[in-house]
Amino acid sequence: MGGSSKKVTVGYKYYVGMHMALCHGPVDKLVRIMVGGRKAWVGNHTGGALTIDKKDLFGGEKREGGVTGQVDIEMGAPTQGQNSYLAAKLGADLLPAFRGVCCAVLRQVYIGLNPYLKDWGWLLQRVHTRKNGEVQWHDAKAQIGAYQLSDSKYLPPPDLSYKLLFPVGSTWAWLNVPYTDTTDYHLTVGSAGSWKAPFADRLPHPYFPNATVYQPISRSDTHWFGKTIYVTDKRPVRISLYCDNRAQVWINDIFVSEIVWSGTIVHTPVSDSIKIVVKLTDDTPLVGGSNYTYFDAYAYQEEVTTSDAWIYYFGDYGDMNPAHIIRECLTDANWGMGYPEEDMGDSFVDAADRLYSEGMGISILWSQQTSIEDFVEEILRHIDAALYVDRTTGKFELQLIRDDYDVDELLVLDQSNISRVEGYSKQALAELVNEITVTYNSNETGQTETVTLQNLAMIQQQGAIIPATVDYPGFAHQRIAAKAAARDLKAMSTPLVTATISANREAAGLNIGGVFRWNWIETDEDGSGIATSYIMRVTEIAFGDGVDNTVRIQCAQDVFALPDIVYVEAEPTEWTNPSVAPLPATPSLVMETPYYEIVRQLGEVDAATKLSGLPELGYLTVAAGRQAAEINAELQVDSGAGYVEGGALDFCPCAVLDGAIGHLETTATLKDGVDLDEFADGSLAQIDDEIVVIESITDGVATIRRGCLDTVPATHADGSEVIIWDGYTASDDVEYVASDEVDVKILTVTGQGPLAIADAPVDSVTMNQRATRPYPPANVQVGGSYYPALVVADDLVGIVVTWAHRDRLQQTGGTVLGWTDASVGPEAGVTYSVRLVRTDTEVELDSSTAISGVTATFAPAYRGEVRLEVWSVRDGLASFQIFSHTFGYISQMPVYHGASQVYHGTTEVYHEI
């Protein structure tokens, strides 16, 4: 404490410049950056520089640091130029522009205090953009999710209309600061004393109101605008901004985008309010005085116009239509199979429309570790579809396996056109599955999640659970995973018929995935025939060799109709995430350090040396309790030059009083205790401004020693905070002097990192030479009583006041004295001052100073309510606290007549109560 020891290096900050190739480009946008499994950045970024500002991502500088710095996102466009950072580091002569490759360039990004590079994860969306920046085929149905609409009959989504949430001209809070002010104000929007209102437009662009004159916005300032809008549901909100010429945007305190001139942000609400903050700057802020910036903003929300439509809510980004994925795999000349667009049949449009209405989008990464053919098969497996080449047109056709046919119109195969049936089989009961678990990669959590469905009738029939697990890594949302689970469970829990059928040319019109009706006579064990009819689906088909034109069909019974709607309730988890968001510390104590505590920290010799050399010296002491699962806390201290780190703080035991206590009670009932298991008998504590010693706590009742060290007893209300700070204090070790004003913020820390400094309340203290001041007198009595309500005048003696000595220098070891303990000292040079004051006029009735003993006597002629004050003085410094007590000074005691009476006023009137 207060030393000037040499700084010690306790760790290093690590920065990295790196070029990462992410995938083929161009892509639509970057949605999320994960570092070490934690979200470092979330937004909708369409290319260029973005800033990561998560300095506490891994616990801040007390743990593993965080991530901050600029990252360039090169989208891979055909006109993409060289990256300036790479050119400066590697030389521009041979550096390619990496066109067609989506890349991230880290420009000396701070990555924490650990030299080992953590995994970086990038969530990218490529739906609407094809190779060389071409627009996607059938682009209106390419993206599924975010605000995808559908109804129970798979009709196309209805048209969207828009509800205006706020127009140009609506009121904003605003704040103007000099361009050189780099403070981040986005968390303080609307706070009293800084942000102002209103700010509204005067077309064509907004102006600041100044009395009756509207003044344009100067380009030499930085302008902050803030507004909260309210929505009634979670449909996406489009926020369009127009500015001159650069705006940074935060939504719900998260940085989402930087816009130059104009741009639109799509945000999907997670609550009924959306807080929008915009920071407006000019690229050339200090050039010219007649140019002005401007700022316009609009917000719209899509409205559903079809009453029976329901919403798929998949987040701020969408999945890709599987029909588009398959088509692009077939046609892309760079990484796909390279077939011409003309080879794609009309069924792709029908399939894309149907998948769009079903909401069956896919988000998946093809890493080229498998063949393109296997990748296409994986997509077909997800959506339950077949891909084949039509033998008449030579075009690829995509057939969805759905309940989309009329049984009466199907081709019928029976004894009249079937020549042979082979491999007929029907699954036995024991072969069936009655429980299925689907695994999928959730975009919401970033983790592998599961959905489990059961066929309860089959479980009862089979007498046991027979499970199966199916992986669908391309599905990113529970709703679609649940539909796939229902589809597969229906197939796996039904005794399916399979067969190979040889038919005449009437079957030549069938293709893979096609459906027909098979009417057949099954022979029973006794030789009798049973007429059956199955709806069969073609799995393989051969059309003969020109000599034998028999159509050979491998088929399976059709049960693959996708359920219209599946409702799945996620299984509730009993696990509670122990890593919660930090809450402000409560209770908290910020004070100037008492002399007793300085001696314990520095030792008696060093403490005396420092204070004799600089009597105005003072130190900061901080203590606090925790609200929930906070681990510890960091101090941020501002003595006039801004907040700086002030050290770490361990939380102390604390509680509140369960009932008020007076000046001299030595027991107190406690409630709402936190960390009381860490309490040690005989610990110093603070109740309001009084220091006490808590000798013990038994069954919630504390035994306490009152008015300790440089404080005097006081009354305390029910609910007063009891802060047991002994052994749990922290200090910034700065040597302050008298009159220094110090503000402190306590940033509690959880597994999610520290509390944001803007969210921490401020505690303040003004240094006042506390450590140098003499201790006040103790054991003060008036007329031989503690805190009397009435004192009767004695014409011979008057008001007799007595007290006990206390010695700051001697009371640094052993048992801490309480208020009623015997005299110790006094400290050399200490005298006492006493005065008596009328409470109605504050006129001093009598006083005495420079008393070296322990008694004083007053004999005022006045009768009425008076206040007695007693304090100590040394070298012109009064004690840190003074004894003060108010009582009635009367000529004689009232006569009681069977009822309690109380003295009132200066005329010695007594009222029955």
Image: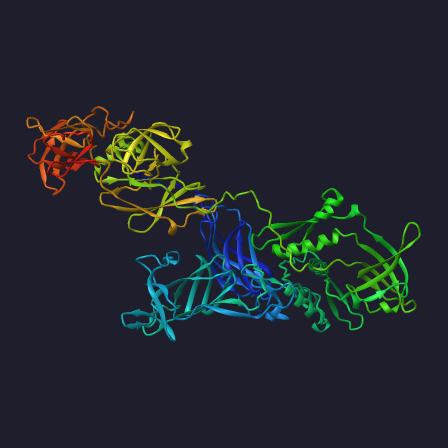
In this view, the residue farthest toward the top is 822
Of 150 and 831, the residue lying toward us: 150
Q: Quadrant of the N terminus?
A: top left
Residue 803 appears left or right of 515: left
Measured as percent of width and height from the top left, residue 174 is found at 35, 63
Q: Is residue 12 left or right of residue 705?
A: right
Residue 831 lies, with reference to residue 35, above or below; the image says: above
Q: How is the image coloured?
A: rainbow
Residue 509 x, y percent position in the rendering: 82, 69
Q: Nearer the viewer, residue 285 or 832?
A: 832
Asked whether residue 827 is in view, the answer is no
Q: Farthest residue in the bottom direction?
A: 204
Residue 629 located left or right of residue 28: left
* In the foreground, 160 or 692: 160
**Res. 691 image quadrant:** top left
Q: Position of residue 803 (x, y in %)?
A: 17, 28
Q: Residue at x 40, y 42 (%)?
A: 633
Residue at 71% over, 54% down:
488
Quarter-of-image position of residue 213: bottom left
**Can residue 909 be seen by looking at this rendering?**
yes
> In the rendered image, which quarter contains the C terminus?
top left
At which x and y percent is residue 618?
Answer: 26, 40
Residue 912 vertical placement versus 166 (above, below) = above
In the image, 407: left or right of 876? right
